[in-house]
Image: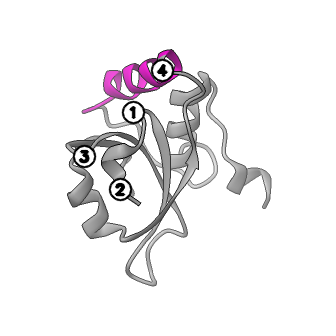
Amino acid sequence: VLAWRFPHGTHVTAMPVRKDGKSEHHAVYVSSEEVINKRWPDGLVIQETWVSFMMRYPLWRVADWPKTAAHGDEIVRRARDRVGKEEGYSDILSNSEHFVRECYTGVASSSNVRNR
């Protein structure tokens, strides 16, 4: 799949390379030059290139697409507004999926937490 063909605001779910890493990691794809995600374990919201993200998480899938171009714009705006902020990290209350879902809907949630 050619990532540079993804619409901005695509929700990407990745698996770590190392076995001792987190089970899943979520990010907002903006472009081949920009992916925004909440870093584990400190909760710093970071901006990196797609290649840098793929080096850490070579196994990934698309979890959700923006509904419209305007929705994609809103997702990206919400994500960019938080870049550089250290928000803490909690597997139950504030993980990378919470971050991406809040960018998507305005409400933080995690299917992993609901399914435990």
Give the residue number, with chain letter if any, for mark 2. 2
* Viewer-side residue, 86 vs 6: 6
Closer to the observer: label 2 or label 3?
2
In the rendered structure, which disc, 4 or 1, sits on the residue that comes first in sequence?
Answer: 1
- Do labels 1 and 3 touch, CB within 8 Å? no
Give the residue number, with chain letter if any, for mark 3. 32
Q: Eyeballing the image, is 37 above or below 115?
A: above
> Residue placed at 36% from the left, 67% from the top?
57
> Residue placed at 25% from the left, 46% from the top?
32
In the rendered structure, which disc, 2 or 3, sits on the residue that comes first in sequence?
Answer: 2
User: How much space separates mark 2 and mark 4, taking CA atoms?
Assistant: 19 Å
What amino acid is found at the position of numbered circle 4 in the picture?
Ala
Q: Which mark is residue 74?
A: none
Task: Give the overall secondary structure of the magenta segment.
Answer: helix
| Range of magenta residues | 70-84
What amino acid is found at the position of numbered circle 1 in the picture?
His
Q: Which mark is residue 8?
A: 1
Task: Tell me, yes or no, if residue 95 can be seen here.
Answer: no
Q: Position of residue 17 (x, y in %)?
A: 38, 78
User: How much space separates mark 4 and mark 3, taking CA atoms?
Assistant: 17 Å
Label 3 Cα crowd, 10 Å radius (few <14 / some 14-19 / many 20+): some
What amino acid is found at the position of numbered circle 3 in the picture?
Ser
In the rendered structure, which disc, 1 or 2, sits on the residue that comes first in sequence?
Answer: 2
User: How much space separates mark 2 and mark 3, taking CA atoms?
Assistant: 10 Å
What amino acid is found at the position of numbered circle 2 in the picture?
Leu
Q: Position of residue 34 (x, y in %)?
A: 25, 41
Q: Which mark is residue 69?
A: 4
* Viewer-side residue, 66 vs 26: 66
